[in-house]
Amino acid sequence: MKVKNCDCCYLPMAKDPKDSGSDKYCSYCYVNGKLLAENMTLKEFKKHSYEGMVKMGIGHFKAWFFAQFIGMAPYWKVRAS
């Protein structure tokens, strides 16, 4: 069963443009069988996500707003503890 949102970035899985091959992570976070965030801090990942959203045409404020929620995602909650 697929989760409703990506466990790493909170992207709604229904909005994922392609299949990542993972039930937990979207195609932006899970690339070539690896989790992109593994070697990043939360701050680095938020910046990476923000820049990616802006590149996709999402406005700066909206991208910043969405990036703020990334720390609440299950992957980051477990990693922080």
Image (cartoon, helix red, strand yellow):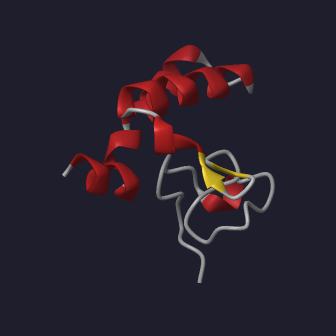
Kindly identify the residue that appears in the image at 30 percent across and 51 percent down: 79
* Residue 22 placement (x, y as % from top left): 65, 68
* Residue 7 placement (x, y as % from top left): 47, 58
Kindly identify the residue that appears in the image at 61 percent across and 72 percent down: 23
The quadrant of the image that shows the N terminus is bottom right
Looking at this rendering, what residue extends furthest in the bottom direction?
1
The residue closer to the viewer here, 9 or 43, is 43
**9 versus 1 height, above or below:** above
Looking at this rendering, what residue extends furthest in the left direction?
81
* Residue 38 placement (x, y as % from top left): 48, 45
Kindly identify the residue that appears in the image at 34 percent across and 41 percent down: 71
Kindly identify the residue that appears in the image at 73 percent across and 60 percent down: 20
Q: Is residue 56 left or right of residue 72?
A: right
* Residue 49 placement (x, y as % from top left): 56, 30
Q: Is residue 50 left or right of residue 30?
A: left
Number of labelled discs?
A: 0
Looking at this rendering, what residue extends furthest in the top direction?
60
